[in-house]
Image (cartoon, rainbow, N blue to C red):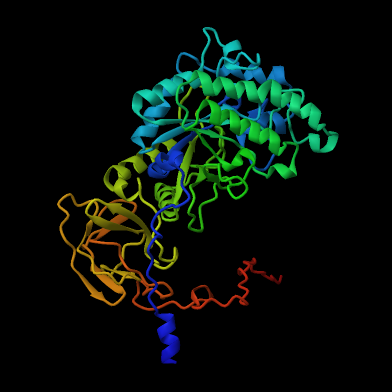
Amino acid sequence: MKKNLFVFLCIILSLNVFSQSHTNERAKWFTDSRFGMFIHWGVYSGAEGYWKGEKLRNDNNYAEWLQYRNRIEKNEYLTLLDRFDWNEINPEEWVILAKKSGMKYVTLTAKHHDGFALWDSKVSEYDLGNYTNPKRDIVKELADACKKHGLKLGLYYSHWVDWEHEFGWDHTREVYGITPEEYDIYWQQKVIPQMRELLTNYGEIGMIWFDMWIHHSQTIVSKEQLLQLKGLIRELQPNCLVNSRLGLSIEEDPDVDFKTLGDNQIGNQKEDFPWQSPATVAHSWGFHATDSEWKSTTTLLKNLINNVSLNGNFMLNIGPRANGDVPFEISQRMLEMGKWLEINGESIYGAEAFDLDKDLHDWGKITYKKTENGFKLFLHVFNWPLNKELGLTGISSIPKNIYSLSDKQKSPLKFSQNGSFTRIDLPDLQTGPYISVIVVEYDKKPEFTNGLVAKTMEGGYSLTPKNINPADETLNIKRKERRNNARICCV
């Protein structure tokens, strides 16, 4: 029994687990930034989720899919541009909102699935330059604003799906078909030359964000076409990042710079390569008039912190209206996040994962950072303990100082150390709105213990099938299914 207990409590010291080892030089700014803005804005913004009184014909309610879902003819679709007030639209305001929100980069839907370009493209007449007088180039205006305010510029480009081009892909092709030779006409006539325009005419591009959510082997796009596109980016903008929704996974092509998770998919495991969650504040990406599924500021901050604690980024979307206005519910939450980051940003920017189990502590998440004078753990306390005691399980090194990140004076908090358990005496009041951050400083890399069960906020220990040590590989854990209670009424 004692031998088993010793195995269970054995200390595993790590030498090189504190960095994202599979991050290339191009992507270092990306992993330092951690937080960015996504902008879904285009012709569809004028419809606001409805076409001639009819709601979007799909339960997913993604407003930017209106043209395809409601089978709107191209010329009719473009009548939505009559609703745009070009005297009011100012992309710099979006960049200013991003900066005030603590975001470090901005990614615009330069061409979404509808195939309409938000710049004055010479490749196609299906672009903003041909439908505004005087001509507007939203990509250029946004690029200039990003440069002015010191944010990185990212551009979303729908390469796989294009509802405008005769030989572009849309999902009716699954029924009616298209040949690889026909699809390549679209690729060489539109994708490659338009990407050349974007990579040539707008200065430094931080990333090109592609949106093919399946592997290339499952659709019409060939690997050779994807490599041609990536090669063009490497030729014209060697420092520009490329995401995995190009259609090539990081495992298949290590030259892909970061992995993109599914829409609104929050990270659940630590990765040693850069990755990102694209997310919305409500539900739809483009503005939808009746979308009201607003996530709280606290929820959004928890999502950001969770991702950083697993070496990930968080890109949060705005869907401006046809006049450029950002819905109040979105801007309010983003500005609140920015206020929190003004105080607690040190725990996010340039921070990364620490190698304790991600679900070890029931009070919140940990991020980690190496500094000039040592090492810091940032304890993000989601649930402030009623007994004003915080337990840090798994660290055997003795801290040199512990304090609240919101305390400019860095007044030391009392603590005691017992083996691999640190007990921290917290202030009577929570140290900030939404989520409090406690800093634990060490002179050198903290030594940690894996395989422990952490003390809960109630002072006990919660033993579950998930924290068995050593893990039982034969154990099959099934998620409990929730069923509605049946009620039998008698009359």
Which residue is painted at 64% across and 41% down in the image?
247
73 left or right of 322 in image: right
Quarter of the image where one finds residue 19: bottom left
Q: Is residue 48 shown to the viewer in this render?
A: no
368 over 96 or under it: above or below? below
The residue positioned 60% from the left and 11% from the top of the image is 130
- Front-most of residues 314 and 290: 314
Answer left or right for 11 relative to 466.
left
Q: Position of residue 457 (x, y in %)?
A: 35, 71
Q: Which residue sits furthest right? A: 176
Q: Is residue 68 above or below residue 307?
A: above
- Identify which residue, 400 or 12, lies in the foreground: 12
Q: Which quadrant of the view contains residue 129?
A: top right
The correct choice, above or below, for 471 with respect to 429 in the image is below
Position in image of residue 372 (x %, y %): 24, 50
Quarter of the image containing the N terminus?
bottom left
- Quarter of the image with the C terminus is bottom right
**Any part of residue 130 in sight:** yes
Q: Residue at x 51, y 54 (%)?
A: 267
Q: How many marks?
A: 0
Q: Nearer the viewer, residue 426 or 47?
A: 426
The residue lying furthest to the top in this view is: 134
Which residue is depicted at the point 36% across and 33% down?
Answer: 99
- Which percent across, then down, holds residue 408? 17, 49
Horizontal and vertical percent for residue 185? 75, 24
